Image (spheres, rainbow, N blue to C red):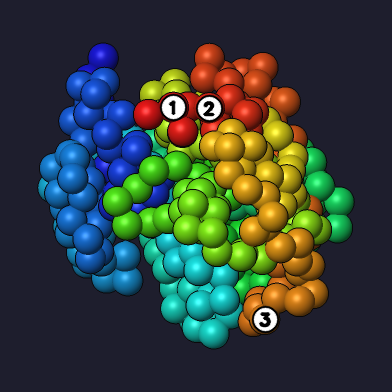
Amino acid sequence: MEMKFLVTGSAGLVGSQVIHDLTDQNHQVYSSYSETKPEHGIPVHLDLTNQENIVQTLNEIKPDKIIHLAAMTRVDQCEEQPDIAMQINAYATKFLAQQSAKQNCFFLYVSTDYVFDGIQGMKKESDTTNPLGIYGKTKLAGEIALNNMASPYAIVRTSTPFGSHKTKKSFPIWVKENLESKNNIPVLVDQFTSPTFVPNLSKMLIEIATKQLVGTFHTAGASRISRYNLAEMVAEKLNLDKKFLQPASMSEMNWKAQRPKDSSLDVSYVTELLDEKPQTVQESLDILFSN
């Protein structure tokens, strides 16, 4: 059944895949963007800091579903500009969801593993949140803003998305290019996540939205792995020399924001629930580097 989707952040790593997949499924897709015009869908300029613009856009489009991906995601930048981060990640999410509720539109909010403190990994959907930095705090504020909504919504948390994109270089691609150029690169041995392959994530998001599944979902990859082990897997897969991978520790990083040491997510709930299952890192890397 054809539905009308509005996708925010549609030019990003995840958004560009979502609008591509929705278009393939013959849905009517409005791709909202702030700066970079997306390649697929019907482009719609949307300023998330402008409430009038949000109201006008939703009234014109009248979407059945909104997939809200647009966010300020640079962790250190959020730390330096907390007011802007709160404006975009929390207040804009709240206002967009309120306007969406007025039209009884299904609202899917994409959140992050950084809502957890990372002291212990493999977090379930019901586990207590405790973000360390401004990025995680503002994304959690966006989640909390949805709790009073009258219309159906889903909160979907993911972890370190990777895939192919014209301008946004994800971690495995960065590793591949540096190893091919024989550059030494520092890679963290003590930061663990659940790396999520973007085409897999996109299909999970679309399934939740089309089925109007309500609640909180951990849509991430099926493997808990350190950055270093992931880099090793990339090297092995492509027969590149691992000697250029320099083991590094989080304490050596010159970061402004504190990051969780283990923000891996337990995906057993969505593995049971969805037709599109979370993939292991190995499966995902096989697909990523197969062409």
The residue depicted at 86 percent of the width and 51 percent of the height is 120
Q: Nearer the viewer, mark 2 or mark 3?
A: 2
Q: Which residue is mark 1?
A: 290
Residue 105 visible here: no
User: Looking at numbered disc 1 in the image, what kind of residue is underneath it?
Assistant: Ser
Compute the Cα span from label 2 to label 3: 33 Å
Residue 27 higher or lower than 234, as above or below: above
Q: Quadrant of the C terminus?
A: top left
Instruction: Specify the farthest residue to the right.
Output: 120
Relative side of 53 to 168, left or right: left
The residue depicted at 24 percent of the width and 57 percent of the height is 33
Within 10 Å of the Cα at label 3, are there few (<14), some (14-19), or many (20+) other Cα atoms?
few
Question: Of marks 2 and 3, which one's residue comes earlier in the chain?
Answer: 3
Q: Which residue is mark 3?
A: 254
Residue 196 visible here: yes
Relative side of 203 to 102, left or right: right
Which one is nearer the viewer's eye here, 23 or 98? 23
The residue depicted at 45 percent of the width and 42 percent of the height is 163
Which corner quadrant of the image does residue 2 belong to?
A: top left
Residue 126 higher or lower than 142, as above or below: above
Q: Which residue is mark 2?
A: 286
Q: Position of residue 93 (x, y in %)?
A: 43, 58
